[in-house]
Image (spheres, helix red, strand yellow):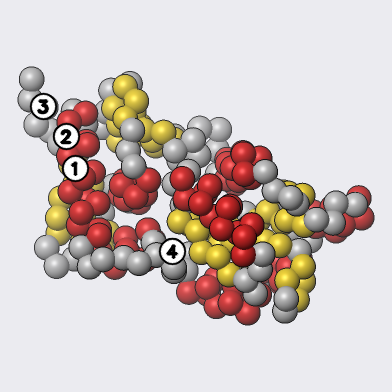
Amino acid sequence: MRMLLVDHHAKLTRVMQVALLDRGFAVDVMPTLDEASLAFGAVRYDILLLELVLPDGNGLDWLRQLRREKHPIPAIMMSSQDDLDTRIAIFNGGADDFLPKPVSTDELIARVRAVLRRSTQVTDPVVTFGNLTFDPIGRQVSVAGQPLKIPRRELCILEHLLNRAGRTLPRAFLVDSLYSFDNEVSSNALEVGIYRLRALLGQAGATLMIKTARGIGYVLELNDKPPDG
């Protein structure tokens, strides 16, 4: 999942970014509303984390504009202003949740997951394909009922493939979706991630496989061949 984090406090945003990256999010940090607007127009985000007071304007005014334009993206507002009137204005302005500053990273992760869970509008967001199940909120994978630990980058690849199982995903789409703007990505980073993911799934006996569509991208399909052993 990809997040747009809009806040100009560099030290705090770095702490939040690291915590979110550890939980499987790709995070783009933008310190101003102008930069946030450019990023929002260029990339599809799953959730917005937004400071109330920014150098070039009010974050809530920007969120109100997004809501007027019918953008449904889940949004969490942050502020050191924690009075009742401010919180009421934030919720009335279209925020899904409010996080007071200073921010606890554990609370941040919990609130992000809660907002994403509500935004799915389903009681069970777990994805099942073959004998593999994936909980996109808890970021947990199991194969034939056994937990499978997958590193963050490979887990992001798996999530995108699962969401479009049976359809070929262009390589460019995967690269754009996986890496935030400030990541340095080597030319073969995606291929390395695919290789590692295939190995993990094979070792776990998953009844699915990642096929390469040469010159295009990758597709996740069921594997009818039983695992060795």
Q: From this view, report whether residue 21 is shown above or below residue 135.
A: below
Task: Please give left or right for residue 36 compared with residue 183 in the image.
Answer: right
Whole-Å distance between the Cαs marked 2 and 4?
A: 28 Å
Q: From this view, report whether residue 37 is shown above or below residue 5.
A: below
Q: Secondary structure at mark 1?
A: helix
- Is the residue under label 4 in contact with that under label 2 (CB below 8 Å)? no
- Is the residue under label 2 in contact with that under label 1 (CB below 8 Å)? yes
Residue type beneath disc 4: Ser
Whole-Å distance between the Cαs marked 1 and 2?
A: 6 Å
Q: Earlier in the sequence, mark 2 or mark 4?
A: 4
Question: Pointer 1: what residue?
Answer: 198
Question: Pointer 4: what residue?
Answer: 180
- Is the residue under label 3 in contact with that under label 1 (CB below 8 Å)? no
Whole-Å distance between the Cαs marked 2 and 3?
A: 11 Å
Q: Earlier in the sequence, mark 4 or mark 1?
A: 4
Nearest the viewer among 4 and 160 is 4
Nearest the viewer among 31 and 215 is 31
Which is in the foreground here, disc 1 or disc 3? 1
- Residue at the spot x=33%, y=21% of the render? 145
Q: Earlier in the sequence, mark 1 or mark 3?
A: 1
Q: Secondary structure at mark 4?
A: loop
Q: Secondary structure at mark 2?
A: helix
Label 4 environment density (alpha carbons within 10 Å; few <14, some 14–19, many ≥20): some
Which is in the foreground here, disc 2 or disc 4? 4
Instruction: Please give the label number shown on residue 202.
Output: 2
Residue type beneath disc 3: Pro
